[in-house]
Image (spheres, rainbow, N blue to C red):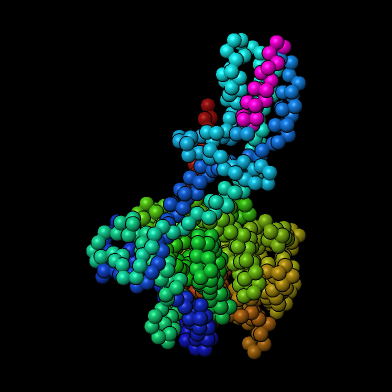
């Protein structure tokens, strides 16, 4: 058996060098704040003195509180309506005051004073005097000018009428002024002349809210920020956060630039080397498969480049980046054991360079594992949104866990919104799998699941035209799947290969014994044919299968199972018959398959299971010893004629496959209990 010859040659080194160069060029050009601290914990470093002047930034909670306070204490704007005043004055001149015309002047004078201050409606009043009316103000827009007026000087409609009664009554105590005002309709002249301007109010107050200062105080160079072993209080943490922002934005690295570049290069080298080791220890055969190797590099670089660019230009949007797609992109073409290590290495730049890298790293690592698990159950159509919601809740739980211990200081509302959007972007970004599938000529797990659906047209046609072959393929599929799982081979790929390996028999189904029932009663396909003719007819099912696979656009990895499931072996029955009948031993090439020897452990598994399933129908004894000898002979026969010479399967794995098949045969061909016949009474 062939052992994989994996050498770290230029096909491996060149891509890794490209990764190293990209990382070195993309890594930040400014130094990161070199202190790690947490509110409520002691300062674990030497006493920190401010090296430069910097403002103290307000926290998100403080800014949110100020904006909320501004919204609740908005200053209203009103428009002064002069036409209301003019109409009231004209109406006052025409009032029928009966026996008391002398009070007309007093009414007009009072109305002038009332309207001068302003009147607003009792209903739907926007006038808020608050807890301290003496400090409340409003703005009145009159004659293209805006003037500020205390709320206490402005009348509500009911207050204005009371003022009118008070002014007139003060000079007329000999009669009932209220009755005269009511009878004459003077009260009706008091109407609102101040109209609430909602548009201007909202616009002006919105601008005021946006102009809230983001700073509160100032720290001068040389001032103490925190002492060694001092507990980091909320105030100290706020100063440290502000110092960190100023340091990373304006100070950066103060030493020789060459050393900074060297540091970036060393970090890039370490991450690239870790990426190499992950592949080397988990599946070194990937280095020999150029397409799969470059695909892994692409997925890795996408995660790293997006991390570095978003962190540079808009770090708050890191919560929105669908990092879980990294796990799903790996899961689509590789085994689960590859997933978590690749994600961890891909997220390292997030951990190293993001300001809250530890929180983001853990959040998206957890979410990636959850995404792969959920996707196994919810991967079709709209069900992907269920996966997205599960991912969102895993992010949410992890985030608030960090927030409760004070490690996440972001705006929680914004962070939750971004996490939700990022989770939904997972659904939007997953279809890129199909583009990658075409670009790298790979076969995704999603595509394999589709191929394994026995309701697809090609398999339905196989079941209709060659029902015996279809049942044989199902049995081989079950055996191969169990064997593949035992040695950690690609079980899904083996299932698909088993279902399609014999599709070529559709073109001549009666040629094969499992479909003999399709022939007329008493007739057999091979009756009257020479051994050579029979062998050629049987061997043709491989080339026929390849043609059908191309016609139905079956992916190349599945077509390879058709080419290799008989390898270069011979049609044993007719080959032996030909020689036993005196055939020329030098003229036997037509008895040998023109296929290809298996190259992978998955192809080896299918070859063995195909032979075991077909030959097991001839067994007469169902004892474990019979099954053991039978499987051993089948495998030894294939090995002796060199069918395993080019495959990368080990003896240990081969023995594991044999044990699985022995147990499988024992289960399907076990002894059955004979049911006793019911006794009848002959009375």
Is residue 421 left or right of 108 when viewed as pictured? left
Taking the image as drawn, is residue 36 in sight?
Answer: yes
Is residue 432 left or right of 490 when viewed as pictured? right
Percent across and percent down for residue 184 are: 70, 15
Residue 580: quadrant of the picture:
bottom right
Magenta span: chief secondary structure: helix
**677 drawn magenta:** no
**Location of residue 198 with respect to 190 vertically, above or below:** below
Q: How many marks?
A: 0
Q: Nearer the viewer, residue 518 or 29?
A: 29
Q: Nearer the viewer, residue 442 or 609?
A: 442
Percent across and percent down for residue 48 are: 29, 69
Q: Nearer the viewer, residue 678 or 109?
A: 109
* Range of residues picked out in magenta: 98-115
Residue 549: quadrant of the picture:
bottom right
- Residue found at x 36% / y 65%: 219
**108 drawn magenta:** yes
Is residue 651 left or right of 329 when viewed as pictured? left
- Residue found at x 56% / y 74%: 298
List the single residue furthest toward the left: 229
């Amino acid at each position: 058996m062939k052992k994989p010859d994996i050498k770290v040659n230029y096909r491996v080194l060149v891509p890794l060098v490209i990764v190293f160069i990209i990382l070195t060029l993309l890594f930040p050009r400014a130094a990161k704040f070199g202190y790690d601290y947490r509110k409520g914990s002691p300062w674990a470093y030497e006493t920190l003195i401010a090296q430069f002047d910097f403002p103290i930034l307000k926290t998100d909670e403080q800014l949110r509180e100020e904006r909320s306070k501004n919204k609740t204490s908005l200053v209203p704007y009103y428009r002064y309506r002069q036409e209301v005043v003019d109409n009231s004055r004209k109406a006052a001149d025409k009032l029928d005051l009966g026996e008391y015309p002398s009070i007309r002047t007093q009414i007009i004078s009072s109305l002038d004073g009332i309207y001068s201050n302003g009147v607003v409606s009792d209903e739907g009043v926007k006038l808020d005097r608050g807890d301290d009316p003496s400090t409340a103000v409003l703005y009145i827009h009159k004659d293209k000018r805006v003037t500020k007026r205390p709320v206490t000087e402005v009348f509500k409609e009911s207050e204005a009428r009371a003022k009118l009664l008070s002014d007139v009554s003060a000079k007329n105590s000999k009669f009932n002024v209220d009755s005269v005002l009511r009878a004459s309709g003077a009260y009706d002249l008091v109407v609102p002349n101040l109209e609430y301007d909602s548009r201007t109010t909202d616009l002006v107050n919105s601008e005021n809210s946006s102009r809230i200062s983001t700073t509160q105080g100032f720290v001068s160079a040389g001032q103490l920020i925190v002492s060694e072993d001092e507990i980091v209080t909320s105030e100290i943490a706020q100063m440290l956060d502000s110092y960190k922002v100023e340091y990373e934005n304006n100070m950066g690295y103060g030493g020789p630039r060459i050393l900074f570049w060297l540091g970036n290069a060393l970090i890039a080298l370490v991450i690239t080397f870790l990426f190499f080791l992950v592949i080397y220890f988990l599946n070194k055969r990937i280095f020999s498969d150029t397409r799969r190797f470059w695909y892994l590099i692409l997925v890795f670089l996408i995660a790293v480049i997006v991390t570095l660019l978003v962190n540079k230009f808009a770090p708050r949007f890191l919560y929105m980046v669908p990092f879980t797609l990294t796990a799903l992109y790996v899961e689509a073409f590789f085994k689960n054991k590859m997933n978590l290590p690749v994600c961890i290495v891909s997220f390292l730049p997030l951990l190293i360079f993001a300001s809250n890298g530890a929180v983001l790293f853990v959040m998206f690592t957890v979410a990636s594992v959850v995404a792969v698990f959920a996707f196994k159950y919810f991967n079709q159509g709209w069900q992907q949104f269920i996966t997205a919601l599960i991912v969102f809740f895993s992010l949410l739980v992890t985030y608030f866990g960090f927030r409760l211990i004070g490690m996440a200081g972001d705006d929680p509302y914004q962070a939750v919104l971004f996490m939700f959007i990022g989770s939904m972007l997972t659904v939007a970004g997953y279809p890129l799998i199909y583009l990658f599938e075409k670009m790298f000529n790979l076969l995704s797990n999603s595509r394999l699941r589709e191929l394994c659906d026995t309701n697809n047209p090609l398999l339905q046609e196989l079941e209709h035209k060659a029902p015996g072959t279809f049942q044989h393929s199902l049995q081989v599929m079950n055996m191969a799947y169990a064997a593949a799982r035992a040695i950690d081979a690609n079980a899904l790929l083996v299932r698909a290969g088993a279902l399609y390996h014999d599709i070529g028999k559709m073109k001549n189904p009666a040629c094969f014994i499992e479909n003999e029932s399709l022939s007329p009663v008493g007739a057999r396909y091979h009756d009257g044919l020479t051994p050579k003719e029979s062998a050629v007819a049987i061997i043709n099912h491989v080339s026929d299968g390849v043609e059908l696979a191309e016609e139905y656009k079956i992916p190349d990895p599945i077509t390879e199972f058709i080419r290799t499931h008989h390898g270069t072996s011979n049609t044993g029955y007719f080959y032996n018959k030909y020689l036993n009948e005196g055939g020329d031993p030098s003229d036997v090439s037509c008895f040998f398959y023109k296929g290809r020897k298996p190259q992978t452990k998955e192809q080896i598994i299918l070859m063995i299971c195909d032979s075991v399933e077909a030959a097991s129908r001839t067994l007469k004894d169902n004892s474990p010893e019979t099954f053991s000898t039978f499987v051993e002979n089948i495998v030894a026969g294939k090995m002796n004629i060199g069918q395993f010479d080019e495959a990368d399967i080990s003896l240990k794995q081969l023995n594991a496959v044999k044990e699985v098949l022995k147990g499988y045969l024992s289960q399907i061909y076990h002894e059955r209990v004979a049911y006793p016949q019911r006794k009848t009474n002959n009375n």
